[in-house]
Image (cartoon, grey):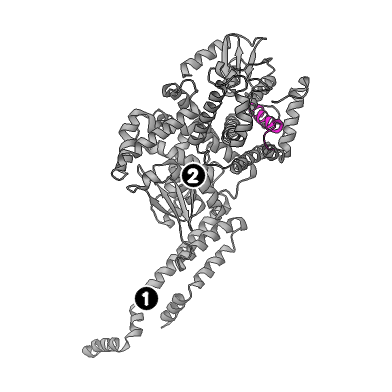
Amino acid sequence: MSLAAEAFVSQIAAAEPWPENATLYQPLKEDQILLSDSASSLAVQTFLRMCGLPVLVSCRANAEYMSPSGKVPFIQVGNQVVSELGPIVQFTKAKGHSLSDGLDDVQRAEMKAYMELVNNMLLTAELYIQWCDDYTATEISRPRYSSPYSWPLNHILAYQKQWEVRRKMNVIGWSGKSLEQVYEDVSQCCQALSQRLGTQPYFFNKQPTELDALVFGHLFTILTTQLTNDELAEKVKSYTNLLSFCHRIEHTYFKDRGRINAA
Amino acid sequence: MRKTRVGALFCSCRLARIKTLSMFLAFIPPCRRSVLSWRCALGCCCMHTNMAEPMELLCWGGDWDLPSVHSDSLIVLAYAKFSGAKLAVKSIDWTWRTITASVPQLHYEGSTVTEPAQILNFLRKQRFNADYELTAKQGADTMAYIALLEEKLRPALLHTFWVDAENYVNLTRPWFTSHSPFPLNFFVPGRQASLALSRILLTKAESPLLNITEVEGKIYSEAKECLNLLSHRLGNFHFFFGDTPTSLDAFVFGHIAPLIKAPLPSGQLQKHLNQLDNLCQFCNTILKNYFTDASAEKRMDCSLTAPHDPVDANLQKLTQLVNKESNLIEKMDDNLRSSPQHRHETKPSARASERNSPLLSKH
């Protein structure tokens, strides 16, 4: 969106309070959704719960196509549609709810930097494992992604998505990496997060921020999703403070739903 | 005669020089000793014999007051200076490597390493570590800020230099064309430009609408925000983690130095950066202290003017003394070799006759 359009949207957003029937759209939980989308969706849900904003989760097979940016999840609030965590955070800020107001400039810089680290390393690693590793792509990703569609559309869409992700990996230089190197990168990223978290309850001590939501979304999904092998989950499990961080957020914000059923 | 004996002593026992240097090392605290001892040992090795083959770096050439115009090459060059690694820098300008090599590239003992992050890891394994004083949390912060730079700033830099029509036609393409051999000069800039465009579109554009104009506003606003964040983080300090530069400083320098120094015809990002004084100061400090061609002593004398620790000041003084000592020894060596008395020892008869004749002629 251009800057003028963004300012316009913020103005409209500020006009109305958060409605009761805000909806979050994601792909089908049982059959279709993949690891990376599930992680992003959980991150947004966690953020909204931390802000205390009610949202209904609705699963649709064509969620990706309904989204304004092509990425899931997206939320529909009143007559506006916003997708991805970054714009959603700005949108809720325009409505007057923010988690990072108490941070000073240096801390805000750190928070943004760590969010980029998670996006750069964890999300890219998830995409790589799903689509660039042939075994996982054949066994899990392609069947799941195309499950709502009939032949021949399912083949076409699955291969199109795989080709798109592989092009992106090529351009950012990840196509030359082996799976072991990707696991090593994930491990380093988790180590950095673990060292930053230390013994604090949240990343910026007392109050949770969008960084906590994002990290929780990714780590919880990695820990609870069944892939072809458990190596990714093992890498995360070796950092005990990250495990206890995930448990703490789950108990604090999701206890009314019981355990979250990740796909 | 005494001089010749002393001369012989100096000429024959160069080890004595190393011993005097190591005496100075005893006064330095252990954590600094490793760096200084490595530097001195390297210097001594190079003085002695060229046993260790130097590491060779391939990179693009320099212009606009910079050692290289390419961001990634600058990162590696800066880190090498910060950590004291001696690199033999070979520029790929006017060679066929402009199209075949992926720059920067480090060659050492048969192995090749590409990509700045991998090269920095390799240098750290060779014990050229500029980050040895960082705490674990600062190391984590380094990783996070590097990710921020890659995600937010790099697309806008690529756009400014390679996609923006005015800059590309007036600055970037002519420069790269003039620094590539015939017939590659027709292909190199175009190839880099298309790589840059595809990178921006694939990572930043929303997939239904792969149009560059939609993305421009977004990437420039993100880049400006990123520069503001870096400026807030740097504050009034000389470097990001205290008084010594680390790998994060190398990454930031590599990204912003071309943006500050290049004479861009249309540079909204450059104008924004020029308003952030502390980042410009940071860049100029590094250029002045690590990349000028002045002698080592002069660099030591005009080094950081910010308040040092007393330990840093002592280290600087000791390094100066060590350098002066070794320079003096070299000079004395040369003087002794070329002194008339030294020559006098070899040809006594001729000299005696010369000396005697004026005496004889006088009386």
Secondary structure of the residue carrying numbered label 1: helix
In this picture, residue B312 sits left or right of residue A196:
left
Residue A55 lies, in percent from the top left, at 67, 15
> Residue B339: x percent and y percent?
35, 76
Report the chain holding disc 2: B
Q: Main secondary structure of the magenta part?
A: helix
Is B317 drawn above or below residue A122 in the view shown? Answer: below
To which residue does mark 2 refer? B115
**Marks 1 and 2, the one that precedes in the sequence:** 2
Is residue A126 visible in this depiction of the protein?
A: no
Q: Circle 1 sits on which residue?
A: B337
- Residue at x 22% of width, y 88% of height: B362
Q: Label 1 sits on what residue type? A: Arg
Looking at the figure, which quarter contains the N terminus of chain B?
Answer: bottom left
Q: Quadrant of residue B210?
A: top left
Image quarter for residue A99? top right
Q: CA distance from mark 1 to mark 2?
A: 48 Å
Depth check: give the residue in front, B91 or B278: B91
Percent coordinates x, y for residue B256 in the rendering? 45, 37
Residue B353, relative to residue B338: is it above or below? below
Residue numbers of the magenta segment: A210-229
